[in-house]
Amino acid sequence: MNAIEVRELVKDYGSFRAVKGISFDVREGEVFGLIGPNGAGKTTTLRIIATLLRISSGSVQVFGNDLRREPHEVRKILSYLPEDAGAYKNLTGREYLQFIADFFASGRAADEIVKKGIEIASLSDRIDDKVDTYSKGMTRRLLVSRALMTEPKLTILDELTSGLDVINAQEIRKTVKSISEKGTTVLLSSHNMLEVELMCDRIALINDGRIVELGTPAELKGKHNASNIEEVFTKVVTA
Amino acid sequence: MSSLTNIVKKEFREMLTKSTIIPVILMAVMFGYLGSMMGDVEEEVSAPPVIGLVDLDDGVISDIAFKVLNASSDMAYNGTDVDAGLEEVKKAGGVALIVLPANLSSDILNGSRGYIDVYWMMEGAGMLDAISSASVDSLLGSMSYGISAYLVNESSETDPAVVLFPVERSDTTIFQDEVMEDVSPDFLITMLSAQSFTVPFIIMMIIIMAGGMVISSMGLEKENKTLETLLTLPVSRGSIVSGKLVASALVGLVMAGIYMVGFNYYMTSIETSAEIDLAKYGLDLSPVDFILVGVSVFVSLLAALSMCMVLGTYAKNYKSAQTLTMPITLLAIIPMFITMFKDFGTLPLALQAVLFVIPFSHPMMAMRELMFGNYALVLGGIAYVTAFAIVMIAITVWIFKTDRLLTGSMKGKGLTRLLRKKR
Ligand SMILES: Nc1ncnc2c1ncn2[C@@H]1O[C@H](COP(=O)(O)OP(=O)(O)O)[C@@H](O)[C@H]1O
Ligand SMILES: [Mg+2]
């Protein structure tokens, strides 16, 4: 079964067409990456799948649920991490995780979720400090743990590590990798082509609202006779 | 260009935007309007006041009194019957009926003070409603002065207490058909002034503060993208909207409650010190009245907050949220000023309409209007404000279900499209 099926998806912002009819499938359990330059339409696509934006035309199925007809069902099985997101600054890390967990479960079940989140965030005793004292890397780790602690069937991560230092970025990649090994399907976006190559089972290259290439990193490198995905991208776009 | 000029230029451009200028212009226009309203009142004052005179004395002193009064007033009645006099003065929209008793001349010429009665006609108890009585006050001063002059020149009277202050007066105020003995308009207005100022001011504060909280919370949520997260959680849009509304309404009510306690304390301390029982004249509030005031405050708060939610959906971040509070601030300040100075009943029709349409006026007026027994205005206001709040909440939920929450920019793309759609 496919986790996500996107068909001829179009998104218009007023008269501006940001996504120009894209189709792709994400298989259950895989890590799928959307890569492309800034403004390519990655965030727009992810926001649509995350039920935040309406579809202009085309269709999206998430685990068999039609996005237009059953957004509420979709919200029960996915988690979405926006690019550059923050948490409520007047809460501590633990309180923030608790706030989110209470939407998914109650009582001891919610406490279990929070425990899991704290483990994933691995902020040690800083978890009880206010979020507004966190560094960018710590905030991102808290938010990643928020997105993963409920063990969603699908997680959508926009610009997973952008703006983070190497150590934080590596930690977060490791966390996401390990959650995917436990069965969560991961859809992520990045403009960092090397990162995507490291993490993704399959990738789609997106440029100017269109998917210009799709496959495993190895396939694409072989097809275009390139040594890395950056090279593939340059070749595809300039061709 | 020096670096200083460079910075000044940048800051200036950043601060002087349409959204900062427009509210100021609106303010100026409003004050202009308020000024012309006061100008009208002043004209009322510079025109001779309309009074009536009941002369039961017909002696030399009352002749002087008549001459002085007649010289600078528009006398609607001059006769010997108090009831007829009251009738005529009221018909002419006059300010006061002055009664000179039968023994006025003899008392004064015999070396004691004379007593006159003044019946005041009051229509409103706002600050500006007091001005016309002030001009009659000074007229009575001239009258007393005229009598003093006569005593000095023409009589052998030497007791300075009588020569300087030949007449003493007792005031009766007829306020909206309620006869209040030993109460002067000044006194009544002072009694009610605590309320005239405090109620509109506190309501304005609550609306601006609670409304500001809602708008900035929306701005913050967008800035931190916590709203985006919230909208992907398994929780209905309706719950998010009502959660925000209920929380801020509760905060608003807590603020209102704190104020009520303070205000109540203030009122009791004034009432005891003034030794006047407003209840004696029907100017108090029954428990039902208090409930109505509470309802009026609550629905207006809800209207304000839901309106702020609509505005807040256009906030992109915390800073733009600050600018978006301007309309609310204006809508709270305008009725505050108007209701402070004039009672609804004594306003020109255009201002009455403005006041009624602005939902926040109603709780500002409610207490006063209930004191006067104007239930129609208060109940009508509650009905109107409730409808207003329902429409605003519906718009908010609708916006939450569309893209506009995330894509609608303050610059108006979403807003203009929304308006275009309506047309
Ligand atoms: N709310 C919006 N209104 C209008 N245009 C938008 C909006 N959001 C994004 N866009 C435009 O859509 C295009 C795709 O943006 P986005 O999906 O954010 O790209 P990416 O995430 O790949 O950098 C860009 O040209 C961007 O300017
Ligand atoms: Mg993006």
Image (spheres, rainbow, N blue to C red):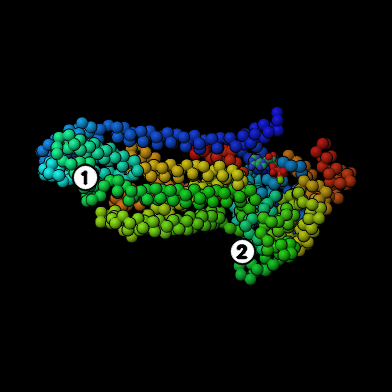
Q: Total of numbered circles in the picture?
A: 2
Q: Amino acid at mark 1?
A: Ala
- Which residue, given by chain and number where applicable, does mark 2 sit on? A102
Q: Secondary structure at mark 1?
A: helix
Task: Tell me what residue is drawn at x 64 percent, y 44 percent.
Answer: A57
Seen from the viewer's position, the closer of residues B114 and B3 is B114
Farthest bottom residue?
A108
Q: Residues within 10 Å of mark 2 (few under 14, many from 20)?
A: some
Q: Secondary structure at mark 2?
A: helix
Q: Is residue B133 visible?
A: yes
Q: How far apart, in angstroms, are the residues tagged by discs 1 and 2? A: 82 Å
- Which residue, given by chain and number where applicable, does mark 1 sit on? B161
Task: Tell me what residue is drawn at x 69 percent, y 54 percent.
Answer: A81
Q: Quadrant of residue A106?
A: bottom right
Q: Position of residue A90 (x, y in %)?
A: 62, 57
Q: Quadrant of residue B267?
A: bottom left
Of badges 1 and 2, the one in the foreground is 1
Q: Is residue A230 left or right of residue B392?
A: right
Q: Quadrant of the C terminus of chain A?
A: top right
Q: Amino acid at mark 2?
A: Asp
Q: Position of residue A30 (x, y in %)?
A: 77, 57
Q: Quadrant of the N terminus of chain A?
A: bottom right
Q: Are marks 1 and 2 in contact (CB under 8 Å)?
A: no
